[in-house]
Amino acid sequence: MFSFNIFQDIPRSFNKTFTCYSISMLSGNEREDVERGGKIIMPPSALDHLTRLNITYPMLFKLTNSAMNRVTHSGVLEFIADEGKVFLPYWMMRNLLLDEGSLIQIESVSLPVATFSRFQPQSPEFLDITNPKAVLENSLRNFACLTTGDVIAINYNKKVYELCVLETKPGPAVSIIECDMNVEFATPVGYKEEIRKVEKDEDMAVDPTDLMPEPKGFVAFKCEGNRLDGKKKKKEDSSASDAPALKIPYQRGIPDYDYQIGTIRFFRYVKPKATEESKEEDNFSAFSGHGFSLRGK
């Protein structure tokens, strides 16, 4: 004896055509929660038909605009629409190239769970968000699935940011309900990285040798010469004798490798005791061109 209920457990798909409208056309209070997500509103008859079918949960649907050959996927939020009508978020209607009152085909589908997705912000202003991954994660809670090629809209801080879904794994359309998904961001559209031009042979604005102190003590051949005949020097002789000022070669400071953190050292200059050699140098330096010495009597 054979049973006629052998096909009872085979799932049957839901496939119907509705007239679609944007959420702004829904009667009653403004539904901002629908605009912020990726779910649609269907009529009660669709719920009655779905309960009599052995479909898989959660309820996911494939939305097709046959006239423009555009496809996307969504979940369902409520079953309160008028009979024969469905209400979609504005960004979803724009992706499907739908106008108010256009026909749309809705079919129940089963999608794999998402493991990876990559988004591209459509404006550099998205970089102003402090933690974009956290903002995206909070916004995707209102979505049921993602479709490669869609441009979704998320609201944050009273601004609408658009993100293009560049890639999804393991398939072109995935379910994001209760899943662990890795997220990456591509370079935003219109973003230009500031490139600083640095010349290789760029001269320094200040010569390091100008920062070195003047030489102290005896400096050879620093005095000006005089003619033995008592005549004044010619311009040619004076220009030849005018030597450039001597400069100490630039030397970088040597760090104190024995420095201990938390200690402060005060260096005091102690004047060395005069010796006979230093006295002779001081007497000779009186005529080295630095000025008059007041040490001698």
Image (cartoon, rainbow, N blue to C red):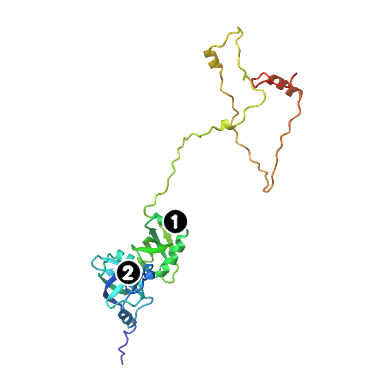
Q: Front-most of 38 and 182?
A: 38
Report crowding for label 2: few under 14, some 14 to 19, many 20 or more residues within 10 A (C-alpha): some
Sequence-earlier tag: 1 or 2 = 2
Mark 1: secondary structure:
helix
What label does residue 128 carry, if any? 1
Taking the image as shown, residue 110 lies to the left or right of residue 245, namely left
Q: Front-most of 194 and 178?
A: 194
Disc 1 residue type (three-letter) = Asp
Residue 293 position in % (x across, y down): 70, 21
Mark 2: secondary structure:
helix
Residue behind mark 2? 24
Question: Could you tell me which quadrant the N terminus lies in?
Answer: bottom left
Q: Looking at the image, which residue is at 30% across and 73% down?
A: 86
Residue 81 position in % (x across, y down): 31, 76
Q: Is residue 165 above or below residue 52?
A: above
Q: Looking at the image, which residue is at 36% across and 64% down?
A: 152
